[in-house]
Every structure is written in C-alpha cells, then in structure tokens.
Image (cartoon, helix red, strand yellow):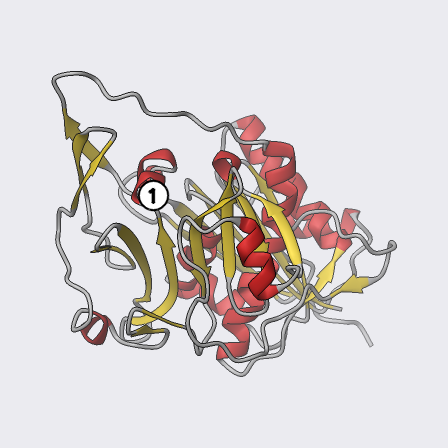
Amino acid sequence: MKKSNKWILSTLAAGAVFALGACTGLSVGGQLGRTAEQSRTAVGQTHVLSATTTSSSTFSVALGEPSAHVKAKLGNPKYGYNGINKTFWWIYDSYWIGFRNGRVVELFTNHKNATYNGVKIGYTRGQVEKKVKYAAKPQWSLFNVGFTFSNLSRDRILYKIGNEALIAYYDTLDKNKLMGIRVVKPEELVYKKYFGYTYRYIKKPAITSYSTDWPSVNRNEAEEILLLSNTERLKKGISPLSWSKQAAASASYHSKDMFTRHYFAHTLPDGRTPFDLMRKQGISFHEAGENIATGYVDAIDAVFGWMNSAGHRKSLLNANFSRLGAGVYETYYTQHFYRP
C-alpha cells in the first residue's frame, strides 16, 4: 500500500521590521522537519536532549554571582553552551544561567513551576502586573547616561525590578499566560539589543562591545531549540521530540542558504522544498513540517516567536511529530519535524 505524505506550510512576519523578529512556519505530513545542529550520535540514530521533567521553584542564584558559587550550590550543569556576545550558558533541569567573565549576567526559565519575585510561569499578564509595574518606556541609568527602552510588544514585555531587568514572554494565543522569564543585568539590554532604545548624552558613553563566536553559537543554539521546544510540549502534555541528526543537517542547510543567498522563504531560489532537503539526507516520513524564523536575538526569542504564531505553534506542538532537527545560522533559524 502506498504511503501518503502530508505537509503544511505557513509564513509569519513578527513585527513591522525584522529587528524584532520574523518567522515562518511549515508543517507537513511528509518529508519535512526542523533542522538543528549536528548531533553527537551515530548516523541513523536519534538522541533526546533532556526534556525538563523535574519541578522547580525559584532561582537559587543571583545576577553577579561568581560561577564557583553557582557550581557549589548546583553542581555541574547538564549542558554548557556558547551564546551571543560572549555569554556562556549553564543549563540545568529547570533553568539556565548565563555567564560572562565568570559572573552571572542572565537567568532564564520556561519551566512550568518556576517563579521569580512572586511572578510564576502560567500567570496571566494581569496577574504578573499585580506583582511588577509595567512602563511603556522603562528607563535605566547605564554607562553614565539615561537609556529609554521601547516596550510596546504584546508577547515580550520588559519590567524594571530595582537594578534588574525582567523580560516576560507571554502566550498571546492562550490568554496572555506567562511562558518564560528572562532576568538580566540591565547592561545586557544594550549589549544584546533585546529592545529598541534611545539615549541622550553630552559625552558619548563608552559601551563595551562583545563579539560572538558564530560557528559555535550556531551549533549550540540548534540544540537549545530542541530543549526549549520539548519543554513547551511537556507543558501541554505532549511527548518530547527526539533529535534527528539527518533533520538537523537539512535544517542547517536551509538556514545557511537563506543567510548566504539573502532570502527568507520555505522554497529555495532553485525551487527545492524543505522536504527535498530532508529526502536528500535519507529521511523517509509519513508526515513532516518546517518552521523558519529570522531577526530574533537568540534561540529563546525564536522559539517563543513560533509559539506566538498559530501556524508555527501547530507544528511545534504537533503530537504526530516524533523527530526534530534544528539549524541556526546567525539570525536564521529552522526546525525540521517529521514522523517516520
């Protein structure tokens, strides 16, 4: 009996300009998946990069804390990944800790039981703003000048909590519930341009520039996409995806091709589809799909962008899909999903 292949494609532009991220999603019931970095398993095998299953309460470390103190409290992380602007992430079961020069500069979690400063994952935006105050133009004094940040997005909101900045990721497709919390030193808002900003000065401020090791970050963020996606699936009671080295290769090819040839689409300029790329890697499927995104700051931003677009979310949370490969090339992100 002949197998039927099924596929779905969708496109999304998040924001009027790509600076705030743009993404498109493709879901197919055939040969399509999401690409990620190269897996460390043998060809033909799949690998589950641990999905978060343990419970979590609050962060037990603070911004500015040295890495030695963190290791003494929490032990060795499950994963260590390079991030943008010389940030190095330690990833534990329920949260991520970002370091630069041996000190904590960022904290992140999307675990269903996580809380921070009275704010809990799963709260609506209204509940969150009973705990922290919203401002359309939050301000910080940084580098000896005053910075004003643009804060008009619906799905990613910046809050000022004392000397810390809290970025809340909301689910605009599910009652504006809180999906993720990122806590950063305010300087990171400038280094990484999480939000647009303006500043006035008499003497121009000296703002340090931190480089990004793109080859390493591309590989690492692909695996991060799997971790982030699986956590969102588990919140919804959906089985986690297994890593596919072949789908990672096809997704990586698509991300790099979009970057190199300056386009943003599911179909390549030569007419090939994501499913063609997957078949070339030897993938056979009954159902497959692709999500793509561009213009986001990092993998965390990209995955929440997909979750806030109905078409992309449908692929990411599709219970029929069992395999995933992801591919990242600077600010281009691709997911290739499939069911063998």
Q: Secondary structure at mark 1?
A: loop
313 shown above or below 224: below
Toward which corner of the image does residue 204 lie, by quadrant?
Answer: top left
Rendered location of residue 217, percent (x, y): 59, 40
Residue positioned 48% across, 45% down in the render: 103
Q: 155 or 112: which is nearer to us?
A: 112
Toward which corner of the image does residue 321 lie, by quadrant?
Answer: bottom right
Q: Please rate how many residues cluster around mark 1, counting C-alpha atoms within 10 Å: few if below 14, some from 14 to 19, many from 20.
A: many
Residue positioned 48% across, 34% down in the render: 85
Rendered location of residue 318, percent (x, y): 55, 73
Rendered location of residue 157, percent (x, y): 25, 56
Q: Which of the image's four quarters has the N terminus?
A: bottom right
Rendered location of residue 179, percent (x, y): 38, 68
13 shown above or below 133: above
| Amino acid on which the number 1 mark rests in the picture | Tyr
Residue positioned 49% across, 80% down in the render: 236
**Total count of labels:** 1
Residue designated by label 1: 194
Q: 199 or 97: which is nearer to us?
A: 97
> Is residue 272 visible to the viewer in this orientation of the structure?
no
> Is residue 168 visible to the viewer in this orientation of the structure?
yes
